[in-house]
Amino acid sequence: MVPAVARPYQPLHMETHRAGSSQEEEPAPHEIKMRIRHLSAWYGTCRALSEITLDIPARSVTAIIGPSGCGKSTLVRCLNRLHEEFPGARRAGRVFLDDLDIYGPLVDPIEVRRRIGMVFQRPNPFPTMSVFDNVAVGLRLHSLARGEALAEAVRAALERAGLWKEVRGQLHRSGVALSGGQQQRLCLARALAVNPEVLLLDEPCASLDPVSTMHIEELIRQLKETHTVVIVTHNIQQAARLADYTAFLLHGTLVEAGPTAQLFTRPADRRTEDYLAGRFG
């Protein structure tokens, strides 16, 4: 059986749903940005995800937590069709962005990745490109801006990522010449430049110092005012600080999902309680 869908925008006294529940209610369409239905994923013959059913609320932060190897990164890579880029990778099930089935036969995966941006665990600015060109690359690829409009869009993205004041005098410097925290914010600016609707963050602070982590977390709080954010994190405290909703994965399955305050204080499944208490993972 598949887990019931966690219903967002409910009072915190609602019951958090368990995996295996037969109840699967559909929230009002405007409340949900992405819908994941019976999603499974493999690397060759190794199954990484099993029958994940989950809703991602709009204009909020959803944290994906769980021990190493539980399928968190695979799940977010399936949400913008990056999983299929791995040799031997495949998936079953459906993922919707609003009413669009992102795996539909006529859907362009490049357009999906514009609408659903991603920032990875380790900063990955393009080493042969300047700060400016790192941010502009997506705008040029999708023919979204040129000339003065391009320059303004790059500036706006750097401002949103909290980096403009630090790099405005060195836009033609190599992106890899920046500090680690600055490089991660540069990657965030690169993702934001094409105006995605959803932002996937795969452990974006894992390789950063505490000060840089604080900057990224503050940016995430600001971004949820206009974007839907999904963050993978090993840091339970970070999930508690940032996330409006949390989903707990274990061995490739969804154990439970719901409002963070509820899941952290009154988990419905003993495995969730044990993980949050540090008894494993």
Image: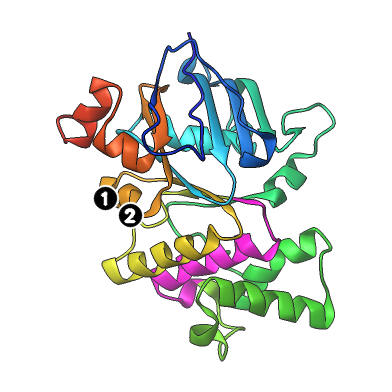
In-image side of 177 versus 241 (left or right)? right
Q: Residue 268 in the image: state x and y as whole percent.
A: 30, 23
User: Magenta stretch: residue 212 in it?
Assistant: no
| Residue topped by disc 2 | 241
Q: Measure the alpha-carbon separation of dots 2 and 1.
A: 6 Å
Predominant SS of the magenta segment: helix
Residue at left offset 70%, top offset 49% = 115
Residue contact between numbered discs 2 and 1, judged by CB atoms under 8 Å = yes
Q: Residue 79 in the image: state x and y as whole percent.
A: 60, 37
Q: Is residue 149 above or below residue 56?
A: below
| Residue topped by disc 1 | 237
User: Magenta stretch: residue 197 in it?
Assistant: yes
Amino acid type of the residue tagged 2 in the rendering:
Arg
Amino acid type of the residue tagged 1 in the rendering:
Gln
Q: Is residue 101 above or below residue 120?
A: above
Asked if residue 125 can be seen in this view, the reply is: no
The mark found on residue 55 in the picture is none
Q: Residue 247 in the image: state x and y as whole percent.
A: 41, 34
Q: Residue 183 in the image: state x and y as whole percent.
A: 47, 69
- The C terminus appears in which quarter of the rendering? top left
* Closer to us: 277 or 134: 277
Q: Residues within 10 Å of mark 2 (few under 14, many from 20)?
A: few
Residue at left offset 67%, top offset 66% = 193
- Residue range (magenta): 176-198
Asked if residue 47 can be seen in this view, the reply is: yes
